[in-house]
Image (tube, rainbow, N blue to C red):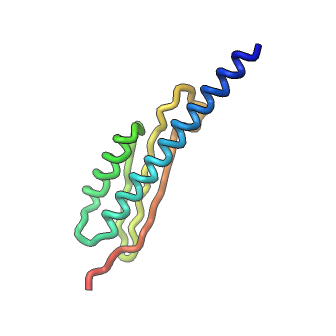
Amino acid sequence: MLWPVVMLVVLGTVQLGVWWHARLTLGAAAATAVDMLSVESASVASAESAALRVAAAGGVEAVTVSARRGPRQVDVVVRGTAPLVIDLGLSRLEVTASAPREVAR
């Protein structure tokens, strides 16, 4: 009777670790894109591409990146799916990041 409970706790712990890793990976991808976009010479396409590479290296699936460069601020939204064995509706993740633009004088 105790064995199934122990297995569920172990599986739940592993799934939580996979979910947390995916969330941290998406955060790193968003930060990479924001850092690139805040510099005047970087393009939106190169920043989105860099974020996709970071997320793919972390094992996150179905990644999309949306980047916007405004006159004073840059915003990036990275969405992806954590590769969970048992999905209870928590596998879809979204991380946003913002930073002020560097202005050349």
Tell me what residue is drawn at x 26 percent, y 86 percent. Answer: 105
Tell me what residue is drawn at x 35 percent, y 58 percent. Answer: 33
Percent x, y of residue 48:
31, 54
Foreground residue among 53 and 10:
10
Number of marks: 0
Percent x, y of residue 34:
37, 62
In the current view of this chain or complex, which residue is farthest to the bottom? Answer: 105
Foreground residue among 92 and 20:
20
Q: Quadrant of residue 77?
A: bottom left
Tell me what residue is drawn at x 47 percent, y 57 percent. Answer: 96
As drawn, is 105 to the left or to the right of 93?
left
Tell me what residue is drawn at x 39 percent, y 41 percent. Answer: 58
Residue 19, compared with residue 27, is above or below; it is above
Residue 33, compared with residue 10, is above or below; it is below
Percent x, y of residue 42:
25, 65
As drawn, is 36 to the left or to the right of 89?
left
| Placement of the N terminus among the 4 image quadrants | top right
As drawn, is 5 to the left or to the right of 34?
right
In the current view of this chain or complex, which residue is farthest to the top? Answer: 1
Percent x, y of residue 78:
42, 51
In the current view of this chain or complex, which residue is farthest to the right? Answer: 1
